[in-house]
Image (cartoon, coloured by chain):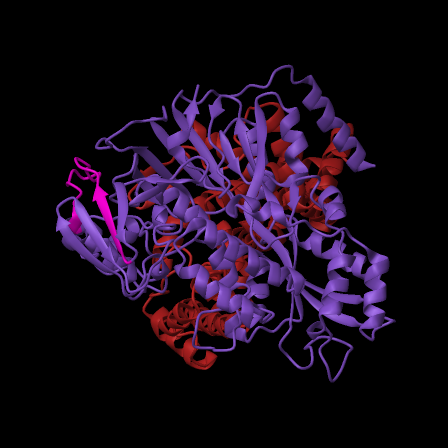
Chain colours: A purple, B red
Amino acid sequence: MLRKVLFAAAAAVALSAASVAVAPASAATLRYANQGDLKSLDPYTLNETTTNAHLGNVYEGLTSRGKDLAIGPGLAERWETPEPTRWRFYLRKGVKFANGEDFTADDVLFSADRVRAAGSNFTTRVPKDAKFVKVDDYTVDVVLSSPNPILNYQWDTWYIMSKKWAEANNAVAPTPASATSPSYASLNANGTGPFRIESHQPGVKTVFKPNPNWRGPTEHNLTEVIFTPINSDATRVAALLSGEVDIIEPVPIQDIQRINSANNVQVLTGPELRTIFLGFDQTRDELLESSVKGKNPFKDAKVREAFYKAIDVEAIKSRVMRGLSTPSALMIAPELFALSKDFTRPKADPEGAKKLLAEAGYPNGFEVGMDCPTDRYVNDGPICQAAVGMLARIGVKVNLNAQPKAQYFAKILKPNGYKTSFYLLGWTPGTLDSHNVLYDIMGCRDDANVARGETNLGGYCNKKLDALTDQILVETDTAKRNQLIKQAFQIGFDDYSYIPLHQQALAWGVAKNVKLVQRADNQVLLYWIKKD
Amino acid sequence: MLAFILRRLFQSALVLLCVGVIAFALFRLVGDPVNQIVSIDTPFEQRQQIRKDLGLDDPSIVQFGRYLVKAARFDFGISYQFRQPVSTLIGERMPATLELTFMAALLSLVVGIPMGVYTALRRGSFLSGVFMSVSLIGVSLPTFLIAILLRWIFSVHLGWLPSFGRGQVVNLGWWSTGLLTVSGIKALILPAITLGLFQMTLIMRLVRAEMLEVLRTDYIKFARARGLSDRAIHFGHALKNTLVPVITIAGLQLGSIIAFALITEYVFQWPGMGALFLGAVQNVDIPVMAAYLLLVSFIFVVVNLVVDILYAVVDPRLRANMQAA
């Protein structure tokens, strides 16, 4: 009763408010809130999307990625490969760091050493044995031991630092994630990018100002950017609706309609590059969590096929994701692989799935445990619950262990010995290239000392696929390379190695007077934002 | 008196040690910090190196010992999330929490005590009925719901008050205050009401119950017989005698609003210690969690001590006991 009275009172107050009074922010100050935070200013400490995106406003790589993620010039104007193992980069002239120093080849050589030094979280950005040779002040050669067609794919987030600045401030060594005292570079930034950092209070507020030494052209019209991390979904949405911030990321799916029905804000959605999938333990002789003893049902491709066919991704899209997902046949987003259209996902077929289970020797199904995070991906918990229901229809009883990401990752990853039987995971290839997926997720992990298959938590293994992956690494002809990738994905597809579910959608809440570019890698980049 | 305080301080050291032991036992269950520090595609070798550097491979007892030795020198380590000294982080966040809790406590006392007195003296009046209903809402609705409701009305629909943050702050030395700017005070209103509402209703109901009890006692009857004014009876005698339990409860509640401001802080993105702690739990930031728990238990111990001393001030009979003990 009291509740009703209270809600009635609240509604009356709300209705009587004739107009929404919003304090207008000064024209070119942008206020932006994100669930995540800028965790370190040292660009080699932490390889993580939100941190990389923020630092991308301040630092630049030799290359850049455009609005459609295409690789373009950055601090290097152009480059060529005179021979397969030698790349030549021509650096931009007249570029200055925010503190006024000139950018030269020495800074590139310095950054190449620093990014590969102990403590860097970005060591894979540059091959260990690549030699950087200074040809002149504005030309750098990179000499490789074997051809590498995707050498510069991740160089947009290998940020170039100033040698002089680092040496003057005792920041030559990268700040490790485990640092016991904060280094100068982790509290200060000096890049060549369009913005500089005015102040940074971790977890509270970061203020960006335009870099006075930016070479231009300037596409944004901002004079100040105030970034606030806001963890709570409801608070972020309220801050946007009340006009206190101009951009929020992400918007929870259930709030999209409410935001769109307000008149001063809207939600921008688009496909994200991350693929959400289910994986099976295919290595142990007996599953850790199952009613089947003495053997591992997931070693039988028929059982995996039955699971595949029992999961109805269209139903997950319409019921769980409210239409905001793109069902996927591949373990990589279609934007990242030219031939992905050649693959189509088989329709859900519970009857066929039941038959397959019977053929495999489980006419009455079986029990299996499933690990699932609840705070990592969009609606991850509900997706798993939906999968449990769908598998129940073919007689498989899934005991769902839905847990916060801190416990989830501690249980299932390599340091704990991959303790899972059946799990949900999401993956964006860091290189935005198929090789990463084939190597990390689908590669055999039979040698514990080799990085191949480290995130292949179920240990799927097919040597033919591995052989193709090795060829893909060194093949420089794009058309040929795509064909090889297609063959490799086909093997994984035919083996029912994984059950790809979908690409989740990006959802950003944006005030209507703000124009921005929503890139599929979920980076909110300030230098393309205009505010009226 | 001094011996009493010293003994209590010694006891508090024991309490802190126990909290530390329990906390470290629980930290084993919160997950692997390395996964929260680095991204999922970090190579295994790098993960192992970080584990080693942080000393996470050592047995818990060794980790605990190391922590104690450092904590004794007020070195609480480096936050895994922010890579800054924990003491700096907590120092930066503490003014926000203390201002919020102080305002909430003030609100609960300044509004709660008069409301309690009024409802006790004017039982059955219309306004008493309103106060009692409001207090029922305050006691029964959970904090986060009140917060969301208040914000929905006053920031989203009316646009009068900010929905998150602390507004403009002014730095007075190491202390950052929001009390000197208009936006800072506006930002404080909703969180302070949210946090203080429960305490306010608690104090109001407590004062009311105690007043009713005291008003029935013999010395009040004698006071009336002596022909003292109502004002002197109600405030000079009755209210003063209700204050002992009120001080106990208000004192203990002050400790708990500092400790449990975290929900309010989380909902309003208030940059205080509670929000820092919640973030630390989500990210398995053990140094921050450990320091926060120690700090909170220390605050409880201090508050208890102050409450005991206040008893002596209010109730002369206790002074003699304390000296004897």
Side of A526 where A23 appears, left or right: right
**Residue B103, x across and y down, in percent:** 50, 40
Among the 4 quarters of the image, the one containing residue B3: bottom left
Q: Is residue A383 above or below residue A392?
A: above
**Residue at (32, 58) in percent of width and height:** A126
**Residue B21, x across and y down, in percent:** 50, 75
Q: Residue furthest bottom?
A: A294
Give the position of the N terminus of chain A as an image quadrant.
top right
Side of A405 where A55 appears, left or right: left
- The residue lying toward the viewer, choosing from A253 and B29, is A253
Q: Residue furthest top?
A: A18
Side of A467 where A121 appears, left or right: left
Give the position of the C terminus of chain A as an image quadrant.
top left
The reply to whether residue A303 is visible in this rendering is: yes
Q: How many marks?
A: 0
**Residue A514, x across and y down, in percent:** 48, 24
- The residue lying toward the viewer, choosing from B134 and A12, is A12
* Magenta stretch, residue numbers: A85-106
Q: Main secondary structure of the magenta part?
A: loop
Q: Is residue A109 above or below residue A510?
A: below
- The residue lying toward the viewer, choosing from A73 and A247, is A73
**Residue A88 is one of the magenta-drawn residues:** yes
The reply to whether residue A165 is visible in this rendering is: no
- The residue lying toward the viewer, choosing from A395 and A205, is A395
Q: Residue furthest left?
A: A136
**Residue A10, x across and y down, in percent:** 71, 28
**Residue A123 is one of the magenta-drawn residues:** no
